[in-house]
Image: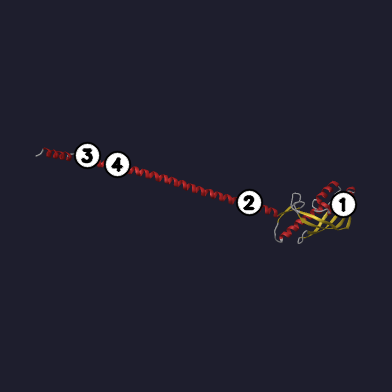
Amino acid sequence: MSLFGSDKKKDKTEEANLPVESQGAPAAASEAKGKGKGKEEGTITTSSDLLVQAFGDIDAGVKRMKLVVIAVAALAAVAICAAFFFVATTIKTAKDNVYILSKDETYYATKSPTAADAVTKTDEIDDFIVRFHELFFNLSPNMDIMKINEERAYAMCGDNSAYLYHNRLEESGFFKNFVQYNMSQEVVVDSIHVNTKDYPYAVRMFGRQIVVRESNATMFSLVTTCNVMDVARSPSNLHGLVLRNFFVEKNEKMKSEQIRRR
């Protein structure tokens, strides 16, 4: 046998006697390397998913915030419109309100575009006419008080018709007699006729004058006419009316009575 042949046989015997671990070492290393690479790729994939999810949450949050802002802006716009409507309605209602003043009471009425408006206007004109005649015809033996009432009556007139009538009485010494003889005069309004179908409103007043002296009281019939016109309301003219073309149609003596003294 050849020497070389026995050496090859010996080598094969030694290779066969190697441990199993040694033979599988390269395969195990290769498998471990493959597992490590797969794990690293899995980690990278998971991080990308989290990043995409985070950006998706931010985008959804921005959209929700936009919806909230739009909803709040819409509600604010609705609230502003409602406030303007309420203010406009309140102003219109206030303009349609009518306050009728008398000696002791203030009456309140609401203006209406129907036939009831004529009744409301008539009531207001009635009170306006009564107030004018009280200021103009109620006299006392105090010249200062008469002057004050005279100026207030003139403020209710839109022309000088009442002034001209008053001036004629003053030139005749009519008012001085009230101071000199301690006289007083009171007007009593019996009825007022107002035509609200035509404008300016035609008014006729039927009443009485009672002149009181120290010894007697004399009653006079009194009929006056005038026209009434609408003007803007103000603190000094709550009725929103003025009187024009004032004329004393009738002023006649009715009766006289003696005043009994106890």
Between the C-alphas of marks 1 and 2, the distance is: 52 Å
Q: Secondary structure at mark 1?
A: helix
Specify the quadrant of the image occupied by residue 107.
Answer: bottom right
Q: Residue at left 74%, top 57%?
A: 121
The image shows residue 153 at horizontal and vertical percentages of: 81, 51
Relative to 215, 78 lies left or right: left
Query: Can residue 192 be seen?
Result: no
Between the C-alphas of marks 4 and 2, the distance is: 78 Å
Q: Secondary structure at mark 2?
A: helix
Q: Residues within 10 Å of mark 4 (few under 14, many from 20)?
A: few
Between the C-alphas of marks 3 and 2, the distance is: 94 Å
- Label 4 belongs to which residue? 33
Question: Foreground residue, 141 or 121?
Answer: 121
Q: Are marks 4 and 1 in contact (CB under 8 Å)?
A: no
Q: Amino acid at mark 3?
A: Ser
Please tell me whether mark 4 or mark 1 is closer to you in this view. 4
Between the C-alphas of marks 4 and 1, the distance is: 129 Å
- Label 2 belongs to which residue? 84
- Label 1 belongs to which residue? 167
Picture disc at residue 22: 3
Between the C-alphas of marks 3 and 4, the distance is: 18 Å
Q: Amino acid at mark 2?
A: Phe
